[in-house]
Amino acid sequence: MRKLLTFRSAGDATFWGGCLAAALILNFIVYDNAVFSGHWVVFALFASINLMWMLVIGTAGLYSFATIGVVGSAAYIGAWISGGSQAGEDLAGARSLNVVFVLLATAAVGALYGAIVAAPTIRLRGVYFALFTIGLAAASRALIEEQSFLGQHQGLSGAARFLSQDLIATENGRTIEFFVGLALITFCLIVYKLVDAGRLGLLLRTARESEGVARGIGVDVVRARFAVFIISSAVLGMIGGFYTSFYGSVSLTIFDFNTLLLLFAMIVVGGLGSAKGAIVGTALLLYIDRTYADIDQPAWRYIWIGIIMFAITILTTRGLVGLPSQIRAYVQRRRARGAAGEAEAVPTPSELEVPGL
Amino acid sequence: MTDLIVTVNLAAVYGLIAVGISLTWAGLGFLNLASGVTFAASLYGAWWAQENISDHPAVIFLGGIVVGAVAGAIICVAVFLPLDGKPNWDTRSMVASLGLSLIGIYTFFLVFGPQRKAIDLLFGTTKFKIGGTTITADKSGAIICATIVMALVVIGLVTTKTGLGVRALTQNPEGAALVGIGRKQAAFAILVVSGALAGFSAVLLSQIFYPEPNIGYLPLLKGLIVALLGGLGSILGTVIAAVLVAATEAVTVHYIHQGWVLVTQLALIAIVLLVRPRGVAGILEATRA
């Protein structure tokens, strides 16, 4: 508990406190706004996915792109076990299950997916793992598309939701969705912090910096990576469960490659290896995405996302959250150079001495 | 027999895309995720040449190849040169190429719209039979052209000074730098040639993959799968992997279903990488040893 409440710096405490305050104030101001509510749910889902992805990419240094595959597969299973059916069919009540049970089941599906993926591939080197998981996400979609009980092209609808029918699109319903979203982000932050600041995080960072050194001091690198992959996959699976419980339906668009790119852009723009980066990147790019989503030329949103992604990558070493320290280091270097230049320009007493005197 | 023809056809074209990806990774440590948009740009280049210059196949090919090469040069100038040698180079170069890819794809949306364009049949409508199987001019033309270009790439790598530099970079980057091989010049050559190869493959596949903004995703994925299975950096490994991947695709489509292609291809990769983490190139090394 003490570990959870300990912040690395006063800036960290201010940041997280500010985020919480901003979310609560925003909700208080626009609590009856359906558009805000819709965006908040998407933010909660994306930020949670990114926090878990950050554990795998940032803390463990494993370039996994299976994220969307885990979330999508678990969302489909969650929708199916909670009564979802192919559009047009009426199976309501046939498999209807409690939402809490659905979340637990989807977490188990996520963990199983993670174990099946990681068992044969976790030993692969960085780029091989990355390429394998990119293909895996596409294969997950292809596999689900082939299953008639999962609705094929039409997807599943009518799954169990957090909100009962009479609460949907009401003020109370939106407030419940806000706090469920906030709880989801908080849960993912706790998992992130427990892993990242804990012993597992230390082992993973050591292995990320130098696998040889880590093995030399007795770290079981494969086991540590396997553990973080299973933990993050279980939570990603649960996020898939949240997805179906928020919307009551799921379709193949959840596997959209553009969504994967958008999520990856968020963590890169925010800054790899930090929870703050995941939140900042998600907020910024989601704002751009939603701003341009409804205008005449929606292509502009991806162009802007691409430009920001490209510019941040070229100009910063650790994304937006690393920018202040990069600027400080730059200013210090300039000052040091300036001081060195002045020292060269001002003659030392020995240089002023006249030879022979 | 039909499966064999389909296999050879796909292998020839996938091999060309994968060679570019493989050389870029092995020589520069750069996973170029903008290869897909290069593919799409080349298709638009070929289509533009057909509509505005001439519908002669040579002009269409030239349009695709030139645009592919220019796209490669842009990637070099925009991504490689500013980031080479900087901290987190491998991650940042990959992400920057992804950013560039997004910009490119959605610029195509704005300029050309979401509708597909059509490119004429490049090798005519002739058909001939081998052992009872009808082979279209399109397939045989693609196989012959891709084989010739692949052979030219290998010859270029073996006989030219630039090729020697590229091979040195893929085998030992530090050693290459010590003997004075310019990394920037080699990078330019690799990226331009990779772009041109992607352009050439795009035109060869233009009867399957029509010019449309998002079209580069699947060829990029196939190229990555082949390059990964081949063992990044090995030309022979890439060629063998292209045949394996294409054969898996042909057999899956014939005996199971089109929707299972990626699943069976990934299963193949998992099996090969479990045995040899460096892919087919690793198997070749073990065989030589």
Image (tube, coloured by chain):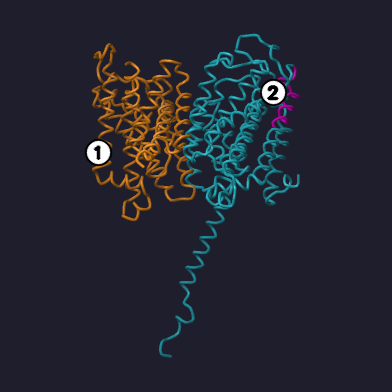
Judge from the rendering whether residue A103 lies leftward or rightward of residue A300; answer left or right.
right
Residue denoted by label 2: A102
Residue denoted by label 1: B155
Q: Residues within 10 Å of mark 2 (few under 14, many from 20)?
A: many
Q: Name chain A's colour.
A: cyan
Q: Disc 2 residue type?
A: Val
- Secondary structure of residue under mark 1: helix
Q: Name chain B's colour.
A: orange
Image location (x, y in percent) of residue B230: 39, 34
Image location (x, y in percent) of residue B25: 40, 41
Residue range highlighted in magenta: A166-181
Q: Chief secondary structure of the magenta span?
A: helix
Residue A170's quadrant in the figure? top right
Q: Could you say which is closer to the camera, residue B60 or residue A161? A: A161
A42 versus B128 height, above or below:
below
- Secondary structure of residue under mark 2: helix
Q: Disc 1 residue type?
A: Ile
